Amino acid sequence: MLYQIIPLEMGSLVQRYIFKKQNKEIKCGTVWKLGSITTTIKPKFISRYQAQVGICIGDIPGAEISKTYDGEKVIYFSETVDEDEQDELTDIFYGKSKKYSGEYTHAFQDLGWKEMGENTYIFGELEIKEINDEPEQYK
């Protein structure tokens, strides 16, 4: 059996990276308008699930991102990152930098930022559907 976990609110599936450098922090990633998670293991987290907090996809046994639609990149800085540095990092993140090309994760690390982790979260009200993973037989 395959189980599909679907957030019922748009923007409730988020992939987030955290980078740190000294007393500075960057949180960035992608927020998907729509998406779903699948797992072959019956979800048991729902009894203790809190919609306003959500759950990390890595904490759902066997879970994988199934589909995502209309992703939007977002970036946030701690108050300790000065404005000029924010501008440079924002340009790198959105691929607009003339000095840096390629993946922003690599450019950030080249600039001394340490990646503290990457996680995908789902939050808000959820629907869990059981999907028969064998094709239906039509007569």
Image (tube, rainbow, N blue to C red):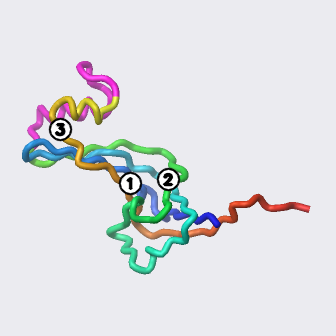
Residue 115 image-quadrant placement = top left
Q: Are marks 3 and 1 in contact (CB under 8 Å)?
A: no
Could you say which disc has been placed on residue 93 in the image?
Answer: none
Q: Residue at x 39, y 50 (%)?
A: 31
* Residue 84 at x, y percent in the picture: 12, 32
Q: Secondary structure at mark 2?
A: strand
- Work out how far the residue at label 3 is from the one at label 1, CA to CA, in angstroms: 20 Å
Neighbourhood count class around disc 1 (C-alpha, 10 Å): few under 14, some 14–19, many 20 upward: some
Q: Secondary structure at mark 3?
A: loop
Neighbourhood count class around disc 3 (C-alpha, 10 Å): few under 14, some 14–19, many 20 upward: some
Which mark sits nearer the N-terminus, 3 or 1? 3
- Label 1 is placed on what type of residue? Thr
Viewed as shown, does residue 135 lie left or right of 43? Answer: right
Q: Nearer the viewer, residue 1 or 82?
A: 1
Residue bearing the label numbered 3? 113
Q: Secondary structure at mark 1?
A: strand
- Work out how far the residue at label 1 is from the one at label 2, CA to CA, in angstroms: 9 Å
* Residue 104 at x, y percent in the picture: 30, 33
* Residue 54 at x, y percent in the picture: 36, 66
Neighbourhood count class around disc 2 (C-alpha, 10 Å): few under 14, some 14–19, many 20 upward: some
Q: Is residue 47 magenta?
A: no
| 82 lies above or below 124 | above
- Work out how far the residue at label 3 is from the one at label 2, CA to CA, in angstroms: 27 Å
- Label 2 is placed on what type of residue? Ile
* Residue 21 at x, y percent in the picture: 12, 42
Residue bearing the label numbered 1? 120
Q: Residue at x 37, y 50 (%)?
A: 15
- Label 3 is placed on what type of residue? Trp
Residue bearing the label numbered 2? 65
The segment highlighted magenta reads 81-102
Viewed as shown, does residue 12 lie left or right of 115? Answer: right
Q: Residue at x 14, y 48 (%)?
A: 78
